[in-house]
Amino acid sequence: MSRPKLLALLCLAVVCAPARAVEPPPLAIAIHGGAGVIDPAKMTPQHAASYRAGLAAALDAGYAILEHGGSSLDAVTAAVRIMEDDPQFNAGRGAVLNHDGDAELDAAIMDGHGPRAGAVAGVRRVRNPIELARLVMEKSPHVLLVAEGAEEFALEQGVALVPREYFRTEARVRELEEARRQAGELKAAAPGPTGTVGAVALDGAGHLAAATSTGGLTDKHRGRVGDSPIVGAGTYADDDSCAVSGTGQGEFFIRQVVAFDICALVLYRHLTLAQAVHEVIRKLRHTGGEGGVIAVDRGGNIAMDFNSVGMFRGARDSRGRRDIAMYRDAQ
Ligand code: ASP
């Protein structure tokens, strides 16, 4: 066959080849409402339905943002803010109380594009700590602001402060009384984790984000800061690897740099997200730490694992997945 004829045939083949469908980038979001606390014997059908409704509201609000072309950063902010306003979770209103009977709130947000991060710790009058964490990231040169300094920054940014009583619910007051009674009787070990909230997401532009917010642990010492606002411990996101939000006994998460460890296993050892999460949660259990994580990678894969009795969680993606669960068997 002559050269021009061959070229003509090749061109025809290219022009006539069926156009290959271009796959839209995957969208994915996962949320948690805390690990460890869920005694199945005490979980009435009404309680279960109420937790599920709270998780569903946060999950669907976050996913709607992604579906409408919004950023993963906006999706995780919205999901966490909804759970901060829901008193059944340990964040914002309804946060657990410290030994003095006050809510001291910690939160962090991380944008995998950059990456950039912002966090606050020990704030007592900020209604939505996740929004203040985001302002720290976007409007200050800093990463972490604490206590009065963080509240001063909130006022500078036009964020109204709320009275400390806003956070205190009857259920948390009873929980604190019980914890103090047990401590008096020397019955209590370290107080268990109780309902921290978090979200991770991948948006249509391929950016990952993570957010976590908490009141920490019941009866904690004033000034105690957990893992949630510590970048790499309870919260981490990097577009090159994954986004992670943790919940559990923060001291263990800080010592083991849990969230970063998962992303490092994905980036440097090329583990799948599920393998990396499994490995780190196993290691956590080995050292006596209880808790779990939610994670998403840049391929839109979601992994959620825990070594406690349960973890409130939900996941939704553009491949049709939507599930909400509390215990190991996806119930
Ligand atoms: N990780 C949180 C903390 O230690 C508690 C929790 O997840 O419930 O502050």
Image (spheres, rainbow, N blue to C red):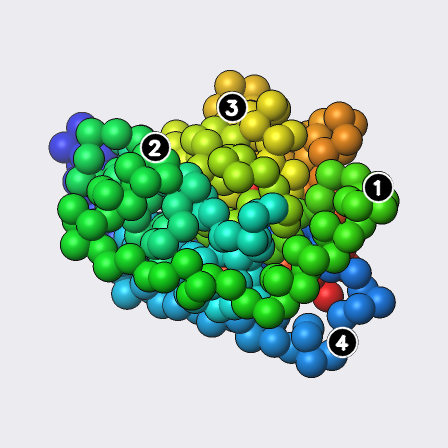
> Which residue is at a point 39% across and 46% down the rendered structure image?
123
> How far separated are the C-alphas under marks 3 and 1?
40 Å
- Of labels 4 and 3, the one closer to you: 4
Residue at the spot of label 4: 44
Identify the residue at image location x=56%, y=20%. 269
- Residue ID for mark 1: 186
Return the x and y of residue 223 as percentages of the image width and height. 49, 36
Amino acid tagged 4:
Thr
Q: Secondary structure at mark 2?
A: strand
The residue where tag 3 is placed is 264
Whole-number angstrom distance, CA of label 2 to CA of label 4? 39 Å
Is disc 3 placed on a helix, strand or loop? Answer: helix
Q: Secondary structure at mark 1?
A: loop
Relative to the observer, which residue lies in front, 118 or 160?
160
**Of marks 3 and 2, which one's residue comes earlier in the chain?**
2
Bin the neighbour count of mark 1 within 10 Å (Cα to Cα): few under 14, some 14-19, many 20 and up. few
Name the residue that disc number 2 marks. 144
Residue type of the residue flagged with mark 2: Leu
Amino acid type shown at disc 1: Leu
Picture residue at 46% right of the left edge, 32% below the top: 230
* Mark found first going from the N terminus, 1 or 4: 4
Residue 267 appears in view: yes
As drawn, is 316 to the left or to the right of 175?
left
Of the image marks 2 and 4, the number of the one nearer the N terminus: 4
The answer to the question of whether label 3 and label 1 lie on touching residues, with beta carbons closer than 8 A, is: no
Q: Quadrant of the C terminus?
A: bottom right
Question: Circle 3: is it few (<14), some (14-19), or many (20+) Cα within 10 Å?
Answer: some
Residue in front for this viewpoint, 87 or 104: 104
Looking at the image, residue 328 sits to the left or right of residue 13; the answer is: right
Does mark 4's beta carbon lie closer than 8 Å to ligand 1? no
Secondary structure type for disc 4: loop
